[in-house]
Image (spheres, helix red, strand yellow):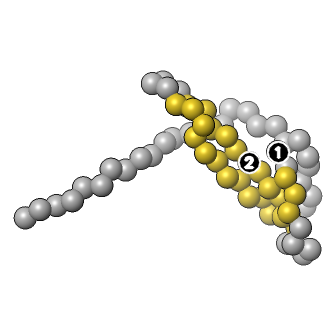
């Protein structure tokens, strides 16, 4: 019997500090997207983009 095994990539991340350049208003929805930018044997660098969406008007602004 032949079993195919797929590799799984996982990362555990902790955010130590994050500055928001623009404030979000009450009622807006925050969307955060992250990607691994750099890796080494003991650390990694993660880039995060933050967008704020006004659910009433549908306008989306960058909050990073």
Question: Which quadrant holds residue 27?
Answer: bottom right
Q: CA distance from mark 2 to mark 1?
A: 6 Å
Question: Which quadrant holds residue 2?
Answer: bottom left
In the structure shown, which secondary structural element does the residue marked by tag 1 occupy? loop
Which one is in front, 36 or 17?
A: 36
Task: Work out which residue is located at the far left of the displayed protein and give it.
Answer: 1
**Residue 14 appears in the rendering:** no
The residue that label 1 is drawn on is 64
Q: Which residue sits at x=51%, y=41%?
A: 12
Callout 2–callout 1 Cβ contact below 8 Å: yes
Question: How would you rate the neighbour count of disc 2 (Cα within 10 Å): few for under 14, some for 14-19, many for 20 or more?
Answer: few
Residue 49's disc is: 2
Q: Position of residue 15 (x, y in %)?
A: 66, 37
In the structure shown, which secondary structural element does the residue marked by tag 2 occupy? strand
Q: Position of residue 45 (x, y in %)?
A: 61, 32
Q: Which residue sits at x=37%, y=50%?
A: 8
Q: Position of residue 39 (x, y in %)?
A: 52, 31
């Amino acid at each position: 019997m032949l079993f195919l095994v797929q590799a799984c990539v996982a990362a555990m991340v902790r955010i130590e500090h994050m500055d928001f350049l623009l404030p979000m208003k009450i009622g807006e929805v925050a969307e955060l997207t992250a990607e691994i930018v750099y890796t080494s044997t003991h650390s990694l660098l993660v880039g995060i983009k933050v967008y704020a969406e006004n659910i009433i008007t549908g306008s989306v602004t960058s909050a990073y």
